[in-house]
Image: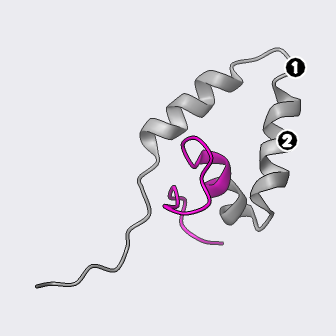
């Protein structure tokens, strides 16, 4: 399993579903469908998404030290 961080590529809105997909080894599309289906159930899905968007760090990229 990889570290939980929002990727810079492959995001649609905040990168939360893409981060969770990388963490659990599924495709980002599958994770997005799971999230959309879960929105049909009662619960705080949108609040959880917003909290993860704020709390998850962005993926670090290789930077050159010029």
Q: Is residue 33 above or below residue 41?
A: below
Is residue 34 found left or right of 5 in the rendered image?
right
> Which of the two labelled residues, at mark 2 and mark 1, occupies the earlier sequence position?
2
Residue 53 x %, y %: 50, 39
**SS for dot 2:** helix
The image quarter in which residue 60 lies: bottom left
On screen, residue 45 above or below 42: below
Res 41 quadrant in image: top right
- Badge 1 element: loop
Residue beneath disc 2? 34
Per the image, the residue denoted by label 1 is 41
Local packing at callout 1 (Cα closer than 10 Å; few below 14, some 14-19, many 20+) is few
**Which SS does the magenta portion mostly show?**
loop
Q: Residues within 10 Å of mark 2 (few under 14, many from 20)?
A: few
Instruction: Please identify the quadrant where the N terminus is shown.
Output: bottom right
The image position of residue 50, as x and y in percent, is: 54, 29
């Amino acid at each position: 399993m990889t570290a939980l961080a929002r990727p810079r590529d492959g995001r649609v809105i905040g990168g939360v579903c893409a981060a969770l997909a990388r963490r659990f080894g599924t495709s980002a599309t599958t994770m997005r469908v799971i999230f959309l289906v879960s929105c049909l159930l009662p619960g705080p899905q949108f609040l959880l998404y917003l909290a993860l968007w704020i709390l998850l760090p962005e993926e670090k990229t290789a930077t050159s030290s010029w």
